[in-house]
Image (cartoon, helix red, strand yellow):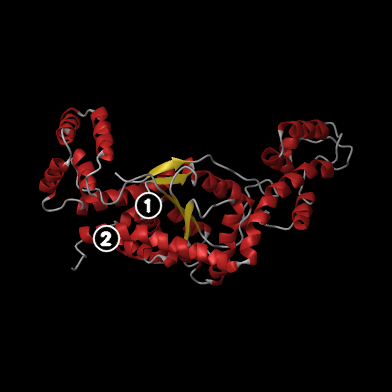
Amino acid sequence: MFPDRILSGMRPTGKLHLGHYHGVLKNWVRLQSEYPCLFMVADLHALTTSYDDVSVIERSVWDMLVDWLAAGVDPEQAIIFIQSQVPEHAELHLLLSMVTPLSWLERVPTYKDQIEKLSHKDLGTYGFLGYPVLMTSDILLYRGNLVPVGEDQVPHVEITREIARRFNHLFGKEPNYQELAEAAIKKMPGKTGKQYAQLRTRYQQEGDAEALLAARDLLAQVQNLSAADRERLFGYLEGGGKMILPESKPLLTEASRMPGLDGAKMSKSYGNTISLREDSESVTKKIRQMPTDPARVRRTDPGNPEKCPVWKLHEVYSDQPTRDWVVQGCTSAGIGCIECKQPVIDGVLAEQKPMFERAQRYLEDPALLRRIVADGCDRARTLAGETMRDVRQAMGLNYK
């Protein structure tokens, strides 16, 4: 068994906005204190749809990294790196592509959907078809067994599980696997090996799930086993082979639908965003110009907050007393729309203030940012190298 570890990333496709903060970055900030986390600039993924104009990728990488740090992602707690600077991503992608059935890729839910949405682009490329294999490689390269996703994205994790399962089935059975597993049991101290064997028998012959959990706990506590022996014995428990790549599990995160300036979901494609580090004058102007309930033609006309895009932002930024004030004032025409918008402006600016403060040190010293990323890439490569050593050995590619 492998320790819990999270890999998550974002494509560098332009400036980040508050939708990215509420939808992804706030969650990262929470997760980094709960699990070992790797946060990746997915520049190779950006190439799958932007290969014909790479200027936006190059331009966006460093701005996005500053935004991450501004939002509270901490390089002391998490590994921050750029995907293309860890070549093992490309290597594992290539090796997994050798064993991934074409039909699996063609039935990925987002494949046809994206083809239709991006019909103005030529996406008849292997890179676009094979992006789930690259995504799988990203996760499995660090043996990231937890994938933070919303409930609607759970099906996307399944292909990662299927590819890992197929790889382990094809390459996890060493020629002398049973002999090696039995030898590993004998290395366990005292009566521990006998207890492991008994629990394994109970699980395999009687389907005792509690025996399986007890055996896993037992293995996790044994100190004198090598990593290879431990992996063999975890696989031996369930009658399989050595687990080389773990089957990832979705880590459900609370869905966040950050409203944009028009009430729809905040998105660059809708042109309704507020950037993460947008200046206060621009933020104020954008919110003051937001559309409101069309029934309020005149200041004296009562309105309905539920029909007003500004109300959706109050639900994010205002406390209950303020929301009560909005409902009372709007429905009675006791307040005007400009008055109603001011607490939202104040809330957005208050949220952005610490972001500007955190970002400033990296804007003043770009070399500091590059040192953080270089260190993150080195740390990522160390972890990736451990996985690739086992993958190459399993596939017969260690020529020594």
Where is 70 relative to 203, above or below? below
Q: Which mark is residue 188?
A: none
Quarter holding the C terminus is bottom left
| Left or right side of 319 for 214 | left
The three-letter amino acid code for the residue at tag 2 is Arg
| Left or right side of 216 for 28 | right
Mark 2 or 1, nearer chain start:
1
CA gap between label 2 and label 1 equals 31 Å
Q: Residues within 10 Å of mark 1 (few under 14, many from 20)?
A: few
| Left or right side of 278 for 24 | left
- Residue 356 at what x, y percent from top left? 68, 56
Where is 31 relative to 194, above or below? below
| Left or right side of 194 for 321 | right
Give the residue number, with chain letter if any, for mark 2.
389
- Residue 55 at what x, y percent from top left? 56, 72
Residue 218, quarter of the rendered image:
top left
Q: Nearer the viewer, residue 390 or 78?
A: 78
The three-letter amino acid code for the residue at tag 1 is Arg
Quarter holding the N terminus is top left
Residue at point 53%, 66% (across, down): 370
Q: Which mark is residue 107?
A: 1
